[in-house]
Image: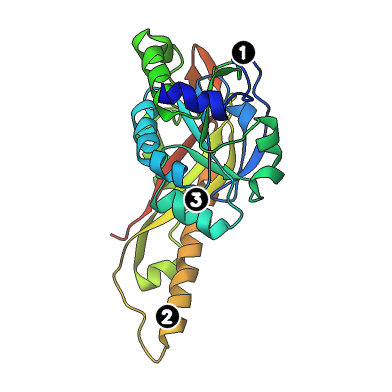
Amino acid sequence: MAQEDLDAKYGTELLKPGTEAPNFTLRALLGKKLELNKTRGGYVVLDFWASWCGDCRKDMPAMSALSRTYFDKGVQFVGVSFDTDSAAWYKCATDVYKLVGAQVSELKKWKETQVSKDYHINWIPTLYLLDPEGKVDLATVEEAKLEKRLQQLDADGTLARYRLQVPQFKGGLDDFVKFMQNNLKYPEAARKVGLQGRVMVGFMVSEDGTLNNIHVERFQPIEAKKALTGSLTTATREAKMRQCVKELEKEAMRVVGKMPRWEPGIRNGRAVNAQFTVPVTFRLQ
């Protein structure tokens, strides 16, 4: 009854099942943008939330768990934040709300955002489940109802039909390794200080196999075998090391941009746009 009462009280104006979900293009955490219509082809969960929302924070552990469980089953999760402070949004999304999926925001006050108007958001958290055609399957303010619906779709085999077959480098892993060995160059500045690390490069593999929206997601240091010594100040040493990291990231972006077309992702028997991430490793012999 509590679930029904909450939807009856806060969810009466939400979009009805069968309604086409309004498209949006919003800034993601890493600065790139996400267009909702490009996620079509599988089930998508939209979670409207904010870091300052107590009820949202209560649901975050359960939503994080759902995203971990159903990501591998082909469901995409998109968190839509109503934060106005980018730092607060980033901290909550990375430290607290560890959603396996994308996080986007207009960085405007809740009632001033176009997305809240389009989706009739009068309470947060609010959840939408969209079907592969981009239409509303479920709209609710209750995480338990979303979980139940996903369980139903999983049990009857519906989710399996839309599970993504991930993109891959033509020729597979062996040819990917050969390509990297033949094309990756170690930046001299990073080599001199012995900086080693792994640059995680993300990109979109389009339906035709071309790579778009190539970007650095993060840098994972391995070690610096040689310390920067001499009369350099701490600030100068740190600045030089940051510059070396930028050189590694720049080279990783260059070599990924040089890659030939990939085998595209496949969902329900057809090629689809798909996000992918590859590690570009710089290691000294």
Q: Classify mark 1: helix, strand or loop.
A: loop
Q: Dot 2, crowdedness within 10 Å: few (<14), some or many (≥20)?
A: some
Q: Of 280 and 134, which appears nearest the observer?
A: 134
Q: Of 241 and 283, which appears nearest the observer?
A: 241
Instruction: Name the residue: 43% across, 72% down.
Output: 241
Instruction: Give the number of the disc on residue 237.
Output: 2
Tell me which amino acid carries mark 3.
Ser
Q: How many labels does the image show?
A: 3
Contact check, label 3 and label 1, Cβ < 8 Å: no
Mark 2 to mark 1 CA distance (whole Å) = 58 Å
Using the image, determine if residue 41 lies above or below residue 184. Answer: above
Can residue 51 be seen from the camera position used here?
yes
Contact check, label 2 and label 1, Cβ < 8 Å: no
Q: In this view, does 75 lie to the left or right of 113?
A: left
Quadrant for the C terminus, please.
bottom left
Can residue 74 be seen from the camera position used here?
no
Mark 3 to mark 1 CA distance (whole Å) = 30 Å
Residue 135 horizontal/vertical position (percent) = 61, 17
Mark closer to the observer (2, 1): 1
Instruction: Give the number of the disc on residue 51.
Output: 3
Of callouts 3 and 1, the N-terminal one: 1
Instruction: Please tell me in which quadrant of the rendered image residue 220 appears.
Output: bottom left
Residue 230 horizontal/vertical position (percent) = 37, 89
Q: Dot 3, crowdedness within 10 Å: few (<14), some or many (≥20)?
A: many
Of callouts 2 and 3, the N-terminal one: 3
Tell me which amino acid carries mark 2.
Arg
Contact check, label 2 and label 3, Cβ < 8 Å: no
Q: Of 199 and 21, which appears nearest the observer?
A: 21
Which residue has dot 1 on it? Answer: 18
Quadrant for the N terminus, please.
top left
